[in-house]
Image (cartoon, grey):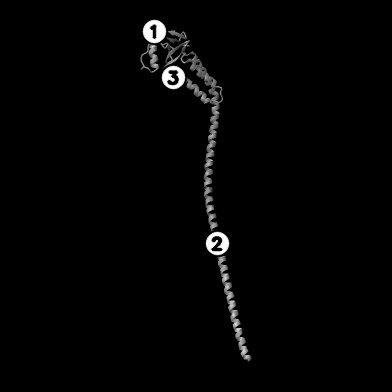
Amino acid sequence: MYRFRSMKWRGGLAVLASLFAAGVYAATVSDVSRSGDQWLVAQADSQKRVDALAEQGRDLANDYRTTLRETEGLKLYLQQLRAQLKSQEEEMAVIRQESSELERTNIEILPLMQRMLGSLEQFVALDVPFLKDERVARVAKLKEMMPRADVTVSEKYRRIVEAYQIEMEYGRTIEAYRGKRGDKEVDFLRVGRVGLFYQTPDGAETGYWDREKKDWTAGSEYSEGVKEGLKVAKKQTSPNLLIVPIQAAASK
């Protein structure tokens, strides 16, 4: 009886041992599996961090290369700026020198222009009195311009020279224009600056400027010549030989 129970007890222990071993095995596999999963997750996280660090490293390398290129570009730009600055400094030195010379030139040229203007005014006053009002007004405008600060010295000089050129041109041209002699309206004929004539529109009166008398002189014998000259000056006929009185220039 006892042996039977002993055998039965040993059998029970064997079953319990088997069950315990099975439980331990199951627990171990579960833990290993869980540990494996955790390891894989950790590996994945580590790989992500490695990839992120690698990407960051590539970005830093790209930024570094970009910075190097920009630095080289800035160096070249600074070199150009230095060259431009040097050129501008040299140009400023030249401008300062030219300004100094210009001031000296202005000091010298202003009296010259005043003399030129005075000579022009005297010349117009003593010359044959053609377009008298126009020429006197031109000189008056030049005199008004001289003290003005808003007109440059070069512009003043240009206008005075221009007035001289206009006076010179009168000596090479023939011109007809209408005006008044006293209270009569007449047609004037200017032949260069050696002859100035007039004729009434109806041709009844003809005359010329007498240099010696400094006055007008009637000369009906030159009526046809003056009439023909007026047509030539007005471009109403082709140039032709004109028979008109010409006086020598007045001596001082």
Query: Viewer-proximal residue, 38 or 216?
Result: 38
Q: Secondary structure at mark 1?
A: helix
Query: Viewer-proximal residue, 102 or 248?
Result: 248
Q: CA distance from mark 2 to mark 1?
A: 123 Å
Dividing the picture into quarters, in which one does residue 246 lie?
top left
Q: Counting residues from the N terminus, which is met first, the one under dot 1 or under dot 3? A: 3
Q: Counting residues from the N terminus, which is met first, the one under dot 3 or under dot 2? A: 2
Tag on residue 48? Answer: 2
What percent of the width, then of the height, locates residue 241?
A: 36, 14
What percent of the width, then of the height, locates residue 183?
A: 48, 10
- Asked if disc 3 and disc 2 are in contact, CB closer than 8 Å, the reply is no
What percent of the width, then of the height, locates residue 152?
A: 53, 26
Q: CA distance from mark 1 to mark 3?
A: 29 Å
Tag on residue 221? Answer: 1
What percent of the width, then of the height, locates residue 97?
A: 54, 31
- For label 1, count other residues whose C-alpha is less than 10 Å away and answer few (under 14), some (14-19) or many (20+): few
Amino acid identity at mark 3: Glu
- For label 2, count other residues whose C-alpha is less than 10 Å away and answer few (under 14), some (14-19) or many (20+): few
251 up-or-down from 38: above or below: above
Q: Secondary structure at mark 3?
A: helix
